Image (tube, rainbow, N blue to C red):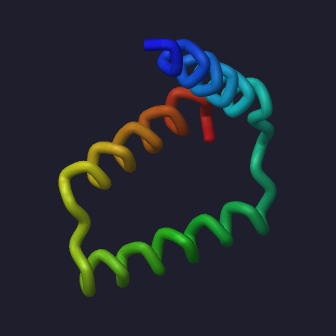
Amino acid sequence: MKTTLPILALAACSLSFALVSCEKKGPAEKVGEKIDEAVEAVEDAIDPKGPGEKIGEALDKAVDKATGN
């Protein structure tokens, strides 16, 4: 129980920094993200993801969409 509070505080700080530090993306960053997505698609075809990974990625995408990234 004693370790739960520091872990929650660290998670809250990390999330708040991620949401506050968002800026508009430049063309190079957008191209880099497209390349990353293509590589992930190839990796998924070779080694499919488990349910935990799928949920995590869905959460990441929801946060990105909510913050305009």
Q: The N terminus appears in which quarter of the rendering?
A: top left
* Residue 37 on image: x %, y %: 48, 69
Q: Nearer the viewer, residue 60 or 15?
A: 15
Eyeballing the image, is 59 above or below 57?
Answer: above
Q: Does residue 46 appear to the left or right of 10 in the view shown?
A: left
2 to the left or right of 31 = left
Residue 40 figure quarter: bottom left
Q: Residue shown at 68%/22% (left/top)?
A: 13
Determine which quarter of the picture holds residue 55.
Answer: top left
Position in image of residue 44 (x %, y %)? 29, 75
Which quarter of the figure has residue 50?
bottom left
Drawn side of residue 43 relative to residue 68, left or right: left
Counting from the top left corner in percent of width and height, residue 23 is at 79, 38
Image quarter where the C terminus lies is: top right
Q: Nearer the viewer, residue 10 or 37?
A: 10
In the rendered view, would you say 26 is above or below 7?
below
Residue 25 point in image, percent of width and height:
76, 50
Q: Residue furthest front?
A: 2
Q: How many marks?
A: 0
Q: State the residue at coordinates (60%, 29%).
A: 67
Q: Residue at x 66, y 30 (%)?
A: 14
